[in-house]
Image (cartoon, helix red, strand yellow):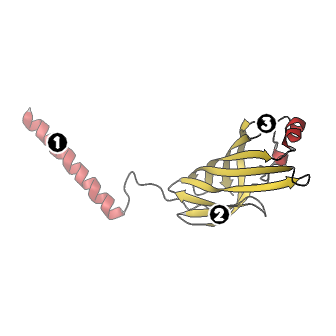
Amino acid sequence: MKSSSLLALAILMSACEEEEEKNRTTGISVGDEAEIIPRLGQWYYDVWEWTAHECGVTDADLPISSEDGFKIPESNRNRFDLSLDSDIELSCSLSGEEFLCGEVSTTSSYNDGTVELQIELLTEGHFRQESFMIGHHQLELDCHGDGCGAVEAWFGVNFPCSAGIDFNAFHE
């Protein structure tokens, strides 16, 4: 009984050694993080779903468009740029399949400075492959100034508020 157990153990050990040798010679090993380099060019949204909608924002109010998609003009193993339109370009870090895009913030003044609206956009997600990503846009809106109460009443929102969009995007 002990000899058959030792024989089985020896066979298993030699199988493991052969697999490790194969991994060394082919350069492929199981468990390494995938290195994704996103494809350059035009990307299109396949899925666009609101996940949080506290601000009463609609697609028409956004600086990004579910219909137009976005462009990736530059990418490598560590980072890529995501161009949402001519005014908004996000610099994104890339670690394996995961990405995180730097926050974009803008402040607009209205009514001689009595209202300042601050909008922040954060984008994150992961790549399933170099031509397909799953992500989330998070919008944070805040208002500063004496006129914010009137803006809240007019639009039926309370500041600060947030809105989230889950998306899938693909490169054609």
53 to the left or right of 99? right
Q: Which residue does the image show at 72% across and 41% down from the upper left?
A: 162
Numbered mark located on residue 81 in the image: 2
Indicate the position of residue 77 as horizontal and vertical percent values: 53, 64
- How far apart marks 2 and 3 lie (CA) works out to 33 Å
Q: Amino acid at mark 2?
A: Asp
Q: Amino acid at mark 1?
A: Leu
Q: Amino acid at mark 3?
A: Asn
Q: Nearer the viewer, residue 5 or 94?
A: 94
Mark 2: secondary structure: strand
131 to the left or right of 35? right
Residues packed near mark 3 inside 10 Å, few (<14), some (14 to 19) or many (20 plus): some
Indicate the position of residue 171 as horizontal and vertical percent values: 67, 57
Q: Are marks 1 and 2 in contact (CB under 8 Å)?
A: no
Q: Quadrant of the C terminus?
A: bottom right
Q: Which of the 4 quarters of the picture holds residue 91? A: bottom right
Residues packed near mark 2 inside 10 Å, few (<14), some (14 to 19) or many (20 plus): many
Q: Name the residue furthest front.
A: 146
Q: Earlier in the sequence, mark 1 or mark 3?
A: 1
Residue holding disc 3 = 158
112 to the left or right of 104? right
Q: Earlier in the sequence, mark 1 or mark 2?
A: 1
Mark 1: secondary structure: helix
Q: Earlier in the sequence, mark 2 or mark 3?
A: 2
Residues packed near mark 1 inside 10 Å, few (<14), some (14 to 19) or many (20 plus): few
Q: Nearer the viewer, residue 87 or 168?
A: 87
Residue holding disc 1 = 9
Q: Which residue does the image show at 72% across and 45% down from the upper left?
A: 140
Indicate the position of residue 127 as horizontal and vertical percent values: 57, 52
Q: Quadrant of the N terminus?
A: top left
